[in-house]
Amino acid sequence: MNTFNLKETTALLHTYGFKCDMKMVSHWISEGNIKSIENGEAYEVLEEEVYRFIEVYRWEGTASEEGIDDQTKIERLLEEIVDLKGQIIKLQKEKAKLEDQLEIMPF
């Protein structure tokens, strides 16, 4: 498996849409969020560890986050429902506006 230095780890995270700099990645490493092997004064991060971090971070703050209690899951799901209902209303308005512009009659 490949290993990455701090700069390479940061670049890989950028390819997955993370808005971070080397200082932030270094902070995540020092906190243990990204596990690494110290090689002198440098860090070596296993490729699989970067992907593990991406997967954990991806679900953070959602109902699918690991280690949260059932009450928190329910609260987050209810928030998501409210958000999705808002998105549906927005899309329905956009659809109606486009139908008007294109003079399309609703079925």
Image (tube, helix red, strand yellow):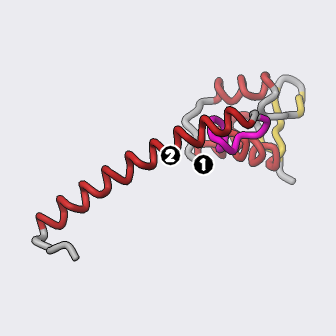
Residue located 82% across and 31% down the image:
43
Taking 20 as reference, is 12 above or below it?
Answer: below
Q: Is residue 71 left or right of residue 89?
A: right
Residue sitting nearer the eye, 5 or 98: 98
* Residue type, label 1: Tyr
Task: Tell me where residue 18 appears, x and y as whole percent.
Answer: 58, 40
Q: Is residue 50 left or right of residue 75?
A: right
Image marks 2 and 1: residues in contact by CB distance under 8 Å: no
Taking 86 as reference, is 61 above or below it?
Answer: above
Residue located 71% across and 47% down the image:
55
Determine which residue is flagged by label 2.
Answer: 81
Residue sitting nearer the eye, 86 or 33: 86
Taking 105 as reference, is 89 above or below it?
Answer: above
Q: Which residues are magenta?
A: 58-67
Residue located 64% across and 26% down the image:
24
Quarter of the figure with the N terminus: bottom right
Residue sitting nearer the eye, 65 or 26: 65
* Residue 16 numbered tag: 1
Quarter of the view holding residue 98:
bottom left
Task: Tell me where residue 28 appears, x and y as whole percent.
Answer: 73, 27
Quarter of the view holding residue 33:
top right
Residue sitting nearer the eye, 20 or 100: 100
Give the Cα distance between marks 2 and 1: 26 Å
Residue 59 included in the magenta stretch of the image:
yes
**Secondary structure at numbered mark 2:** helix
Residue located 63% across and 35% down the image:
61
**Comparing labels 2 and 1, the label whose residue is closer to the camera:** 2
Task: Tell me where residue 50 appears, x and y as whole percent.
Answer: 75, 44
Farthest residue, direction bottom: 107
* Residue type, label 2: Ile
Quarter of the figure with the C terminus: bottom left
Q: Is residue 91 left or right of residue 33?
A: left
